[in-house]
Image (cartoon, rainbow, N blue to C red):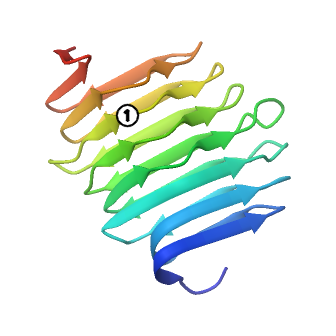
Amino acid sequence: TTGTLATTGLLTTSSVTGQTLTQANTVGSFNATNSSSGAINLTNTAGMLTITGIAQNGIVAGSDVTVNNTGAITTTGAITTTGAPANGNIALTATGGTMTLGNLVTAGGAGTVTLSATGATSDILFNATTSSGSGNIDATAGRNVTLNAGSVTTAGSRALAGQWRVTADGQQR
């Protein structure tokens, strides 16, 4: 896509070969579905982005999900990728804002999950399960990583890092 998209409402996309929206878009909410090949990429500059769901059903390598927002990210719908042979990766970045995971984040097969909330006061709040079949899960925050509900599960490695603290079940880790 050439140019930028702007709406305080919901941007819904549906594609067969991926969607690349990497200009300085400004949308309030995002929902995406991809059915065959290609990645789902969104670069956004809203103070708050709500992801209402992403279903990456691509069946070939490179069927990944990447969302970068200049500000906070909240998820209200599931974010999923398929397993083999695609093994889609999920990467979410909230630059200068907190990331609140309110629904499932699931990378199929060996797909990885990378969560990043940058900025000195940025947190990652797990309020739902985040998982991968066998890929690594990495969550890094400028301040705190907090597991309020759900779990972080994979047969691969898990790395949760906060500059101040990492807490689960109310206990500092």
Above or below for 43 versus 92: below
Q: Nearer the viewer, residue 60 or 153?
A: 153
Residue 61 drawn at (x, y percent): 79, 42
Residue 119, compared with residue 153, is above or below; it is: below
Q: Badge 1 is on which residue?
A: 127
Q: What residue do we see at 71% from left, 57% from top?
A: 33
What number of labels is visible?
Answer: 1
Instruction: Using residue 71 as the reference point, say whether residue 66 is left or right of it.
Output: right
Residue 145, image x, y percentages: 27, 31
Image height of 54 relative to 144, above or below: below
Q: What amino acid is at disc 1?
A: Asn
Q: Residue 41's spot in the image, x, y percent?
A: 60, 60
Q: Nearer the viewer, residue 68 or 35?
A: 35
**Can residue 22 be seen in the rendering of this structure?**
no
Q: Is residue 146 visible?
A: yes
Label 1's element? loop
